[in-house]
């Protein structure tokens, strides 16, 4: 039977709405039904376009939060980053961390920086690119973890919130980016993902092995980045002691396999440095120094309370949810679906907080390592809220639940959006002047001050920046004359030894470097003999400089920082000491 074109189109249109010909009642009934909370909630894990859209959102968020610490807006890296970049550059030149450079971080951070410098021809942009890569994979892996346990809409809000909180860290401190905690985020997420990916059963043997490998890599970034490992160990032990002795075999096997992955990872690296005759220096720099560094200050409480200012809503809700999990644990009215996850969160949260504040220094970037567990706790809170709203009024939830989630993201995002305004203004200015993507220190407003040092000492000459200003060695291409590229190890009388001081003094005598005393600083100025008497072991170094050097010139160098939506200028006096 032949149909007119009008009839064909009419049938196709009506069939696309699943409505029988001539019947309009179905459409009216469907219109009366409440809309679904979010199409993501019904999204299958293999939904290609849904997953792509979420990954694109997470990538854009990661890119936005890392813009403030890009070389375009922070051309002079901050202190810690300057050390990592300088040693990374040395690695590319064939030098060995600890043997040729003193620093107390794990070796992995130097090789990550070396890779970034290698990819972009010794440009700081390469390291920033690796930061974006690490953070994006961390966010996507975190979303997969949360999606496996919670609704997709909750998982995307939880993931977006912790990424936005990371942006708050960058915009509330003087200099950021290229922190060991940033790279640890990926390793944290990998461990937690492998541990929690199975809803009812413990991970398999292979999964536990790779948990150990990722935990070992965390230790190779910094020794106290072991909170996921500790949380996993304790959760397994908790599970074990709830079982009969004859049922604990699987848990013992899990602990053994996990430990084998951990030990193997560390053993490979230790064997490499042993082969380079650097194992003793490595253990002394990383283990012994950090032992003395722990508890070197007492800002525990002030740092903890500062975390609420820096991280915002996710910190308040996350820690409150953790407290609720403990309070309601024995009452069997948990907001989460399984006790395995809850036990892990109860153990992991305080371990992370304590280990991150172990030094007592209270640096803002320490809060970065809190973000994975806070993101999961926020998801637990939202799931509890979802359940409450459904019981209260299911129709209201189906229609307006998405508004609640938008409000959560908005509260987390507003402080960051406010702080990003100053970066937007600076970027517009740089674009107008055409120097947004220039390479080298010419991008920096302080370059006009810094370059006067070339009038005293040419490029590639040995320069010792007194204190901890290795970023200038990297940016201005001045090699340090000594293995001790900054003076912090000598400020701890319990750690510093006479052989260390003699090695430092011998390097100064042999290389006769120009010494740039950057003040004010936590390291006393060279000419302040009274302050150096508090560090009697360093007096021979001070006396040698005073007797064989003279202060040839002084110059002011002004650095600019964009913090809390304001431009901050900090002027340092560079006192240039030249050998007689």
Image (cartoon, helix red, strand yellow):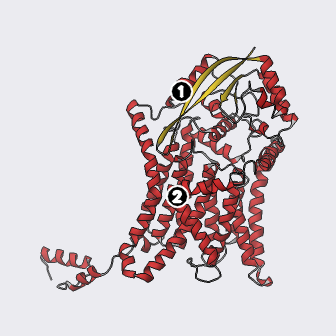
Look at the picture and state if 358 lies above or below 16.
above
Mark 1 or 2, nearer chain start: 2
The image quadrant where one finds the N terminus is bottom left
544 and 213: which is toward the camera: 544
Dot 2 falls on a residue whose secondary structure is loop
- Residue under circle 2? 312
Which is closer to the viewer, label 1 or label 2?
2
Which quadrant would the C terminus be assigned to in this image?
A: top right
Q: CA distance from mark 1 to mark 2?
A: 35 Å
**Residue depicted at x 65% and y 32%:** 520
| Residue 353 image-quadrant placement | bottom right
Q: Say the numbered circle drawn on residue 447.
A: 1
In the visual, does 17 lie left or right of 444?
A: left
Can residue 167 be seen here? The reply is yes
Q: Position of residue 257 (x, y in %)?
A: 75, 67
Determine whether, in the image, residue 436 is placed left or right of residue 7.
Answer: right
In the rendered image, the vertical position of residue 16 relative to residue 309, given as above or below: below
């Amino acid at each position: 039977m032949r149909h007119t074109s009008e009839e064909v189109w009419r049938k196709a249109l009506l069939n696309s709405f699943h409505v029988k010909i001539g019947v309009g009642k179905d459409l009216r009934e469907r219109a009366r039904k409440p809309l679904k909370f979010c199409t993501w909630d019904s999204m299958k894990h293999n939904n290609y376009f849904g997953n792509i859209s979420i990954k694109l959102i997470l990538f854009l968020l990661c890119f936005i939060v890392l813009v403030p610490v890009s070389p375009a807006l922070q051309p002079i890296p901050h202190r810690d980053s300057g050390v990592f970049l300088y040693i990374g550059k040395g690695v590319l030149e064939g030098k060995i961390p600890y043997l040729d450079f003193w620093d107390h971080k794990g070796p992995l951070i130097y090789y990550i920086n070396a890779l970034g410098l290698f990819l972009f021809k010794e440009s700081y942009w390469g390291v920033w690119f690796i930061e974006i890569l690490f953070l994006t994979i961390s966010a996507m892996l975190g979303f997969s973890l949360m999606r496996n346990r919670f609704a997709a809409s909750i998982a995307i809000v939880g993931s977006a919130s912790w990424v936005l909180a990371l942006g708050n860290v960058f915009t509330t401190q003087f200099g950021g980016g290229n922190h060991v905690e940033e790279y640890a985020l990926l390793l944290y997420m990998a461990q937690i993902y492998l541990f929690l990916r199975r809803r009812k059963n413990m991970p398999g043997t292979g999964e536990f092995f790779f948990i150990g490998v990722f935990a070992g890599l965390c230790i190779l970034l910094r020794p106290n980045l072991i909170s996921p490992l500790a949380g996993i160990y304790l959760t397994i032990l908790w599970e074990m002691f709830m079982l009969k002795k004859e049922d604990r075999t699987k848990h013992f096997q899990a602990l053994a396999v996990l430990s084998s992955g951990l030990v193997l990872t560390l053993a490979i690296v230790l064997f490499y440095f042993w082969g380079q005759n650097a194992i003793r220096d490595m253990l002394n720099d990383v283990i012994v120094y950090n032992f003395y560094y722990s508890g070197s200050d007492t800002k525990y409480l002030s740092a903890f309370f500062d975390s609420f200012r820096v991280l915002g809503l996710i910190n308040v809700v996350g820690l409150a949810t953790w407290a609720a999990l403990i309070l309601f644990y024995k009452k069997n009215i948990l907001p989460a679906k399984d006790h395995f996850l809850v036990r892990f969160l109860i153990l992991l949260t305080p371990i992370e907080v304590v280990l991150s504040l172990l030094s007592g220094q209270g640096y803002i970037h320490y809060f970065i390592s809190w973000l994975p567990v806070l993101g999961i706790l926020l998801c637990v809170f939202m799931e509890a809220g979802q359940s409450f709203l459904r019981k209260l009024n299911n129709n209201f939830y189906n229609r307006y639940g998405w508004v609640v989630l938008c409000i959560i993201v908005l509260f987390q995002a507003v402080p960051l959006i406010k702080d990003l305004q100053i970066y937007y203004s600076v970027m517009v200015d740089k674009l107008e002047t055409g120097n947004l993507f220039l390479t080298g220190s010419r991008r920096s407003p302080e370059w006009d001050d810094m370059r006067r040092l070339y009038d005293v000492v040419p490029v590639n000459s040995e320069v010792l920046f007194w204190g901890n200003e290795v970023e200038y060695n990297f940016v201005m291409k001045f090699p340090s004359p000594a293995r001790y590229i900054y003076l912090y190890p000598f400020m701890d009388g319990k750690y510093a030894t006479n052989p260390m001081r003699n090695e430092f003094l011998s390097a100064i005598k042999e290389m006769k470097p120009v010494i740039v005393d950057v003040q004010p600083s936590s390291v006393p100025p060279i000419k302040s003999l009274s302050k150096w008497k508090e560090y009697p072991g360093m007096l021979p170094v001070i006396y040698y400089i005073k007797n064989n050097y003279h202060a040839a010139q002084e110059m002011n160098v002004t650095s600019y920082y964009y913090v809390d939506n304001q431009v901050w200028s900090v002027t340092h006096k560079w006192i240039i000491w030249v050998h007689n």
